[in-house]
Image (cartoon, helix red, strand yellow):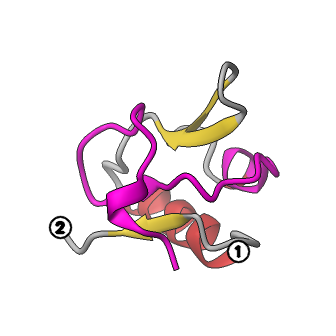
Amino acid sequence: MADIDEKTPLNVPGKFYVDSSCIDCDLCRETAPENFGRDDDEGVSYVKKQPDNETEQEACVEAMEGCPVEAIGDDGE
């Protein structure tokens, strides 16, 4: 389960976030490319844009549910 206290610094404010347990597997960036980006310096993903429509929301949920290390969180906002 993702830890909100460990979220990576590049996450934009909002509901979804990626924490420091990310293993850079690319699943979230493939599943929701509009919303997730890669920090090349740290080798981790982050939320670059919060979803602003149903399609993006569903893609973010799919990425969160598919994350192999549960590094994507939903803080319930």
Give the crowd class for mark 1: few <14, some 14-19, many >=20 residues within 10 Å: some
Residue type at numbered disc 2? Glu
Quick one: SS at disc 2?
Answer: loop
What's the distance in space between the residues labelled 2 and 1, CA to CA? 21 Å
How crowded pointer 2 is (Cα within 10 Å; few <14, some 14-19, many 20+) is rated as few
Q: From what the image shows, is residue 34 above or below residue 76? A: above
Q: Secondary structure at mark 1?
A: helix
Residue at 31%, 48% in the rendered image: 52
Give me the residue at 70% from left, 74% from top: 66
Q: Nearer the viewer, residue 10 or 30?
A: 10
Give the image location of residue 20, x and y in percent.
55, 52
Q: Does residue 69 sit above or below 1 in this rendering? A: above
Which residue is situated farthest in the right direction here?
A: 25
Q: Nearer the viewer, residue 16 or 61?
A: 16
The residue carrying mark 1 is: 66
Q: Is residue 16 shown above or below 64?
A: above
Residue identifier under label 2: 77
Image coordinates for residue 41, horizontal then vertical, percent? 67, 19
Q: Quadrant of residue 8?
A: top left
Spot the residue most to the left.
77
Left or right: 52 with respect to 21? left
Tell me, yes or no, whether the highlighted magenta stretch contains residue 40. Answer: no
Horizontal side of residue 12 vs 13, given as left or right: right
Q: Give the percent coordinates (x, y) of residue 46.
A: 52, 41
